[in-house]
Amino acid sequence: MLIGQIIGRGAPRPVPDAALLQSQLVAKARRDQAVPVRVAATRALDLLPGGNVLLILEEIAREDPDQTVRYTAERLIYDRRQDPARERPEKETD
């Protein structure tokens, strides 16, 4: 949850190693053995901007072996689709 809060907090300056933190969060959401960890990581992923998060959530909703994790991902997908502004990719900075 902490990784998601750090990346998703909307700080005025970029988070160092944000891509590494995001990849670790995705790994926890997809492959951790503990269901509560996968649920927390899936929720934390929802704090991240961009359409690629939707793809990851869709994969989790389809493939996770636990119903609680799948439901969490499905609910987050539904919520994201209700707010299309969240699906726009982040603006690149030069």
Image: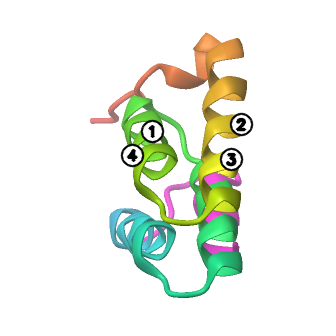
Q: Residue at x 42, y 67 (%)?
A: 30
Query: Which residue in the protein does label 4 denote?
Result: 59
Q: Nearer the viewer, residue 54 or 59?
A: 59
Identity of the amino acid at label 3? Tyr
Q: CA distance from mark 3 to mark 4?
A: 12 Å
Closer to the chain start, of discs 1 and 3, is 1
- Secondary structure of the residue carrying numbered label 4: helix
Total numbered badges shown on the rendered structure: 4
**Span shown in magenta:** 1-16
Quick check: 80 above or below 25?
above
Dot in front, 1 or 3: 3
The residue singled out by tag 2 in the image is 75
Report the residue marked by disc 1: 58
Going 44% across and 72% down the picture, which residue do you hit? 21
Report, in whole angstroms, how far the alpha carbon at label 1 lies from the one at label 4: 4 Å
**Mark 1 Cα shell of 10 Å, populated few (<14), some (14-19), many (≥20):** some
Element class at badge 1: helix
What residue lies at 59% left-to-right and 24% top-to-bottom? Answer: 86
Question: Residue 91: horizontal and vertical position, in percent?
Answer: 40, 27
Instruction: Kindly indicate whether the residue at mark 2 contacts the one at mark 3 (C-beta within 8 angstroms).
Output: yes
3 vs 2, front mark: 3
Give the Cα separation between the discs numbered 1 and 3: 11 Å
Which residue type carries mark 4? Glu
Quarter in which the C terminus is drawn: top left
Comparing 28 with 84, the one in front is 28
Q: Quadrant of residue 81?
A: top right
Element type at mark 2: helix
Indicate yes or no whether the magenta region holds residue 41.
no
Circles 2 and 4: CB atoms closer than 8 Å: no
The reply to whether the C-beta atoms of the residues labelled 1 and 4 are less than 8 Å apart is yes
| Rendered residue at 45%/41% (across/down) | 53
